[in-house]
Image: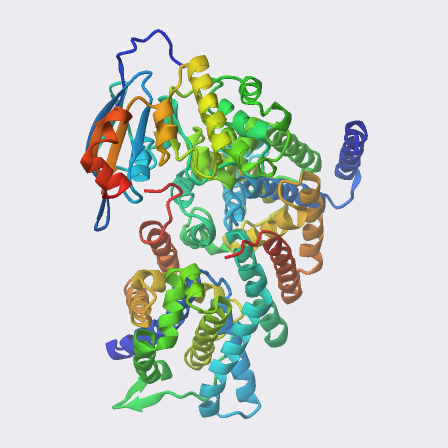
Amino acid sequence: MPKKSSLFLRLLLFAALLLFALFFPDRSLTVRVFLFGAATLGLSFFLSVCREACLCSASFLGIGALTAALISHGNLHPFSLFSAFLGSVLFSSLIALLVGSFLLRLEGDLFSLGSFCFSEALRVVLEGLPFTGGARGCDLACWEPMPLSAFLFFLFVFLLLAFLKGSSFSLFASAVNDAPLGASAVGVSVHRVRMKGFCLMAAICGGAGFFYASVSGILLPADNAYLRSCDLLASAVLGGENNLIGGLFASLLLSVGEVAFSSLAGVRLLLLAGIFLLFSLKSGKRGRKSL
Amino acid sequence: MIFGRKSSEILLEARGLSRRFGGLLAVDNISFSLQKGENIAFAGANGAGKTSLFDLLTGFSHPTEGEILIREQRMPSDPVSFVRAGVARTFQNLQLFPDQTVKEQLQTAYLACNKRGPKTSELLHLAGLWKERDRSVLSIPYGSQKICELLRALATGADLIFLDEPAAGMNQWEKEQFILLLQKLKGRYGVQFAIIEHDISFLSALCPRVLILERGRLLADGPPENIFSLPKVRASFLGKG
Amino acid sequence: MNFLSLLTAALSLGCCYGLLAIGYGFLYHLCRLFNYAHGDLLMLCGYLSLFLSRLGVKNGLLLLLSPLLGGLVSFLSEKLVYAPIKGAKPIDTMLAGIGLSFLFQGAALLLFGATPVSFSDTLALSFGGVRISAFLWLTPLLLIPLSLLYAKSPLFLRLRAMADDPFGAVCCGISENRCRQIVFLFSGALAGLCGFLYGQEFYLTPAIGTLLGIKAFAASVLGGGSSPLSSFLGGLLLGLAETLLASLFPSVFLDAFVFLLLLGLLFFRIRRPLQRA
């Protein structure tokens, strides 16, 4: 497709999204679509960099939400909210830096397992801590859903990842995935590339957490653990690896699905199962090596 | 590349290098030094420890004992540190990036080393791969893939490149062209090579010095015309009789 | 709860982890596969056994049927999901496992609901006033022949050869596909039996499978190696530690301890460095 028409279509899409953000009556759903869309893009980016199934992306969403709630502490002044947003991004990145230095030394299924363990351990710890509200949750986030801000955040993430897709970082990521030995042999630090991917994903999810806090009311640790991470992973695989538009539509589908199937957990699980199985069968057959 | 240094400067020094894998001593107390501008070859029977030694000398393996110095600086066992110090390598089994084009292979190395090395277009023109620049690296002939991996190592701006069996799988004509290319690169960029090779004529054409390894130990060290006539070398490398 | 009761409860839990860990050990060391849905297979077989029990099937017969059920479901999982993607990237295998896990959980949730359930009639024995759960008397009867089979039988020799060097094993005429199917059958049978016994001793819910599976995998890593005995001992140790610690300290952080333990084990015992050492 010629570049000009592709650019035109993208501008049209963003105009439609802006109108959606400004005029759709359900502000909560609007914010959900954009925040999960951004988180999905972040996870999709990580998938393209590391090609690992991360099962703790929602934990960073939760960390971001909790951090924002604790920093704002019920204060709705714009400066307080901005600090809360910044704090959620930075704190999530810091946690990712600490955790990633161990976790990213693992590969493949061990990494996925490790990320699951981190996610569940964090949930259990947060449920046990009094200052986070424990298992009853934290109710300090009392600012209204902000659809326009959520849209701008999503747009920022989209543009950032589009920029990175065309930068030297994508060459390094491709090198690291294709031939780690070869990448090391030309001076590309495998661990550093993976860390950057992980921390950026965590930062994006942390930022999305700020918006999540506004739509969820009470922040329960169990809401942002393994299952939510699987939701985001399903969005990311459904949308396609590093496919920015696809990620947005997938997250829209799953946001609507989450609301529609809120009382039909079994159906929702079966839908997720279908997504994962179909994707893995399709992708796995393509990437199969012979003995 | 770093210019303006004396040609007698020691670029790389290995002191008492040993590498053990469980019960197997793959590299046994090897010491040698390499002058700047000097090409060197490593030869020996299969299992002599050549690739294990290369892994140590390029940071891909951690020595059980001993140390490696590059320009008198002690090196950590990290390949990226070696690349930053001007030492790069190629592999016995090619480690190209299959999802990238020929041009992207070199660009990756060029950008990873902060544009220190020669430009991608310059290298591709020199090696006659400019027309293949936008092709997937897997779609070019094997000999060209080998050249691509060599150019990628050069794009890092390395002063010393370790080549692990560069002529393996090549026919005689390709080997001759490869020798010419290496000589051209050496003349143009001042890069020196350390080569593992079984083909004596190949390594003799490029390297005035050969180190013979046997069961992880350094058996002999000298010019190829002297080394291969030694009885112990003939017995080890070429077989008795 | 007196000490003897606590000990038998701890040993029962340890036996559960141990049996599940044996299956994980087989899958991981013999097939180089982490089957994410293995714990959920236990849960599903527990529910299916309970369903059959409510239809009037006796516990004695269920003792034989549950491993068959587990083996069948596991065999079908291998045939329909894992076999087509054999040799694929680890992420695809992981996603397939997660998909299977959700499939089992979703099916259990839809068919049986979320309310915790348990068997009304158990195979537990009473000895001198002490309740001996089915786990405790059955596990030794199972473990001894399984260990002998693993160590001495030509079948497991072939499986271990395939695990060590697939190409070499194929050159000796050993079928890779057949080996995988056998490993899945064995591990599925153990999970099926474990599910039945778990339902007898504890409560079944659709969500317990994932947690049990992770703990059992931790036990398998703790034990080290692929032999049934080592995996089982890892499970026993974990079950004992978990129950005894829970009685001494608040249990709110106990699960976190298990997860962090596994993280540590993954990192220090079986991580595969990205660069050659």
| Residue A116 in sight from this viewpoint | no
* Residue found at x 74% / y 38%: A21
Left or right: residue A210 compared with residue A92: right
Give x and y (percent) for residue C237.
28, 67
Q: Quadrant of the N terminus of chain B?
A: top left
Give x and y (percent) for residue A177.
51, 40
Left or right: residue A86 compared with residue C15: right
| Closest to the observer, C270 or A42 | C270
| Closest to the observer, B128 or C48 | B128
* Residue found at x 61% / y 38%: B139
| Closest to the observer, B217 or C182 | B217
Give x and y (percent) for residue A161.
61, 33
Q: Quadrant of the C terminus of chain B?
A: top left
- Which quadrant of the structure image shows residue A169? top right
| Residue C97 in sight from this viewpoint | yes
Question: Which residue is farthest front?
Answer: B241
- Which quadrant of the structure image shows residue C138? bottom left
Q: How is the image coloured?
A: rainbow
Answer above or below: position of B158 versus B23.
Answer: above
Answer above or below: position of B111 versus A287.
Answer: above
Answer above or below: position of A282 versus B13.
Answer: below
Answer above or below: position of A70 versus A83.
Answer: below
- Which quadrant of the structure image shows residue B41? top left
Give x and y (percent) for residue B74.
25, 25
* Residue found at x 62% / y 28%: B132
Q: How many marks?
A: 0
